[in-house]
């Protein structure tokens, strides 16, 4: 019996040691030196650090940069006081649509972190809309850098309410679709207005278990000083931030654009990882 207890204690101690070691390893990785990226353009160089808290996006970006995929791509979508978007391999002059098409279609699992948000200079992943991408998975290659604008506290309160209203509408829509599909399968034509009314109690119950969205003190401090795009928080993965070259973003965001917000004159980039 004593031997059995000794073996159990030995196993349990080993488990604790492994658990503590794994936890320490995770913390060490997040506290490790963050990779630095240089994006060189004709308007200047943007220096970015990649967050260790978003390892999927960090490692994917490093892989693409080191392989040269980004070199020669352009900032193909530019909106002043909003963001500059690039990273689409199809914008490279030498892009081979037949052999390189896989680069256009793969996605990454979202990595939302409450402390990583869309302040000016944030690096984030572009993605397809919720109607075809409810999981909010990121584009494998395309990214954007936030320019944004400065908000007042009152404007942030309005945005927070809008986010809560949007969540409510999304949940109600999902409930209606689920219910109507069941009716249709049984040959019954659904009345969507009646369904919406009948599902209000269910909706309120679901919402009662979800906290209201509110901007944190850090978000409010950033958005009321340096600015950003707060309405994108929680919907797009932020995986880095500009540490030098915010003025370059302003220059690119101000260029003349044509159809689909594409700059009239191409702005190619060269992307280099300078530390790992």
Image (tube, rainbow, N blue to C red):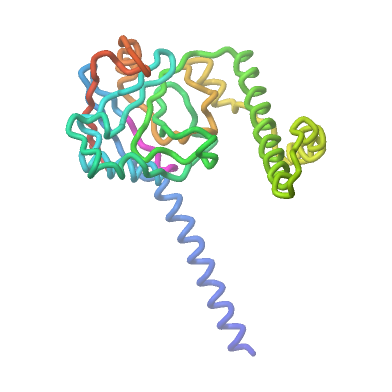
Residue at horizontal 46%, vertical 34%?
128
Q: Seen from this angle, which residue lies furthest left?
A: 94
From the top left corner, tell me how far across and down residue 92 is, in percent: 22, 30
* Residue 69 is a magenta residue: no
Residue at horizontal 53%, vertical 42%?
135
User: Quadrant location of residue 181?
Assistant: top right
Q: Which of 238 and 126 is in front in this view?
A: 126
Say if 106 sits above or below 167 in the image.
Answer: below
Left/right of residue 267 with respect to residue 181 in the rendered view: left
User: Quadrant location of residue 252?
Assistant: top left
Say if 160 sits above or below 114 in the image.
Answer: above
Q: Nearer the viewer, residue 105 or 166?
A: 105
From the top left corner, tell me how far across and down residue 152 is, in percent: 58, 12
Left/right of residue 202 with respect to residue 264 in the rendered view: right
From the top left corner, tell me how far across and down residue 175 is, in percent: 71, 40
Q: Seen from this angle, which residue lies furthest front?
A: 187
In what quadrant of the picture does the C terminus appear?
Answer: top left
Say if 107 sits above or below 71 in the image.
Answer: below
Task: Count the marks.
Answer: 0
Left/right of residue 275 with respect to residue 134 in the rendered view: left
Q: Give the range drawn in magenta.
A: 48-54
In what quadrant of the picture does the N terminus appear?
Answer: bottom right
From the top left corner, tell me how far across and down residue 193 is, in percent: 77, 30
Q: Nearer the viewer, residue 105 or 52?
A: 105
Q: Nearer the viewer, residue 88 or 32?
A: 88
Left/right of residue 126 with respect to residue 275 in the rendered view: right
């Amino acid at each position: 019996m004593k031997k059995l207890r000794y073996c159990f204690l030995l196993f349990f101690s080993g488990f604790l040691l492994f658990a503590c070691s794994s936890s320490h390893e995770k913390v060490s990785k997040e506290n490790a030196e963050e990779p630095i990226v240089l994006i060189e353009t004709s308007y200047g160089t943007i220096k970015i650090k990649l967050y260790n808290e978003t390892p999927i996006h960090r490692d994917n970006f490093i892989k693409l940069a080191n392989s040269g995929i980004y070199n020669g791509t352009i900032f193909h979508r530019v909106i002043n006081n909003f963001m500059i978007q690039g990273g689409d391999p199809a914008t490279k002059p030498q892009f081979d649509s037949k052999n390189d098409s896989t680069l256009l279609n793969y996605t990454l699992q979202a990595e939302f972190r409450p402390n990583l948000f869309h302040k000016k200079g944030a690096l984030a992943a572009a993605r397809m809309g919720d109607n075809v991408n409810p999981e909010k998975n990121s584009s494998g290659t395309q990214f954007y850098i936030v320019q944004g604008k400065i908000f007042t506290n009152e404007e942030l309160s309005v945005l927070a309410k809008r986010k809560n209203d949007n969540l409510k509408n999304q949940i109600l829509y999902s409930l209606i679709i689920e219910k109507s599909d069941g009716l249709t399968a049984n040959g019954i034509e659904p009345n969507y207005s009646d369904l919406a009314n009948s599902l209000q109690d269910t909706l309120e119950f679901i919402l009662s278990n979800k906290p209201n969205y509110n901007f944190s003190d850090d978000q409010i401090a950033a958005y009321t000083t340096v600015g950003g795009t707060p309405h994108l928080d929680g919907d797009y993965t932020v995986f880095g931030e500009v540490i030098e070259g915010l003025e370059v973003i302003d220059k690119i965001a101000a260029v003349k654009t044509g159809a689909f917000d594409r700059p009239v004159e191409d702005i190619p980039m060269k992307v280099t990882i300078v530390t790992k």
